[in-house]
Every structure is written in structure tokens, then in C-alpha cells.
Image (cartoon, grey):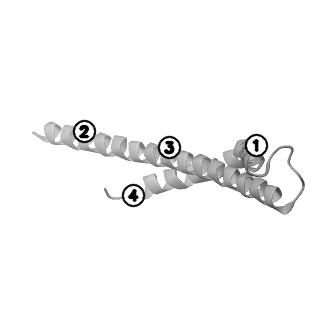
Amino acid sequence: MKTTETSKKGLYTGVGAGLVLFALVGLLPGSFIGGVIGMNIAGSICGLPLTSTLLPRLIVAVSMLTGVMLSGVVFVTGSAIVGWLAGTTVEALKARKTMTMGHAETVRIK
């Protein structure tokens, strides 16, 4: 399928909206959820209550980063797909309208 300007504009708009949504809505929950998962993993490996040694801190930090990255991927990718679909839909509607109008003009000539 050929990518045209309208679908590209929709894609870029979707990516921008996804970045803003991620910064406003997804950053903190991604960090919290990743941290809780990391604490559960570190607790099962090192035992509870967690001590302040290097390994549990490292596990929690890596899982927090993973949660933030996964949240970013979901927000940006999801909104980019929605923007691209909106641009493609607008293109299809424009093409259909011009095709219908072109057919109407040929009927008027006859």
C-alpha cells in the first residue's frame, strides 16, 4: 500500500499525541507497577523483608525501567497506529469523493 502525505501526517500526529499522553499518564504508573513487580521478584529471590543490598535494588531498578519502557511503547505505538488509521481513512474518503465527483461530471457531459 502506498503511503501518502495524509497518512504520514496522521502517523506523526499520533506519535506526538502518544508522547504527550505517555508523559502525562503513563510514566508514573509504569514506574510504580514495574517497581512492585521488581519488589515481588526480589522478595522471592532474596527473601522478605528485603535488605538494602545491591541485588534487590538492582532488580527493582531494572524492573522499574522495564515498566516505564513498556508503558512508553504501548502509548506511542498505540496512538501512532490510531493516527495512521485516521490518516488512511481520510485519504480513502477523499479518493472516493473525487472518484464519485469525476463520474458525475462524465454523466453531465453526455
Q: Is residue 49 left or right of residue 102?
A: right
Query: In front: 72, or 82?
Result: 72
What distance separates the C-alpha of mark 1 from that of mark 2?
A: 57 Å
Say few, some or many: other residues with alpha carbon within 10 Å of mark 3 (under 14 / 14 to 19 / 20 or more): some
Secondary structure category for the residue under label 3: helix
What distance separates the C-alpha of mark 1 from that of mark 3?
A: 30 Å
What distance separates the C-alpha of mark 2 from that of mark 3?
A: 27 Å
- Residue positioned 75% across, 56% down in the render: 59
Which quadrant is home to the C terminus?
A: top left
Amino acid, disc 1: Val
Amino acid, disc 4: Thr
Discs 4/2, front: 4
Question: Residue 105: horizontal and vertical position, in percent?
Answer: 20, 41
Amino acid, disc 2: Thr
Q: Earlier in the sequence, mark 4 or mark 3?
A: 4
Res 18 label: none
Q: In this figure, which residue is indicated by the disc labeled 1? A: 36
Q: Quadrant of residue 53?
A: bottom right
Res 4 label: 4
Res 82 label: 3
Discs 4/1, front: 1
Secondary structure category for the residue under label 1: helix
Label 4 with label 2: CB-CB less than 8 Å: no
Discs 4/3, front: 3
Q: In this figure, which residue is indicated by the disc labeled 2? A: 100
Label 1 with label 3: CB-CB less than 8 Å: no
Say few, some or many: other residues with alpha carbon within 10 Å of mark 2 (under 14 / 14 to 19 / 20 or more): few
Q: Is residue 48 left or right of residue 66?
A: right
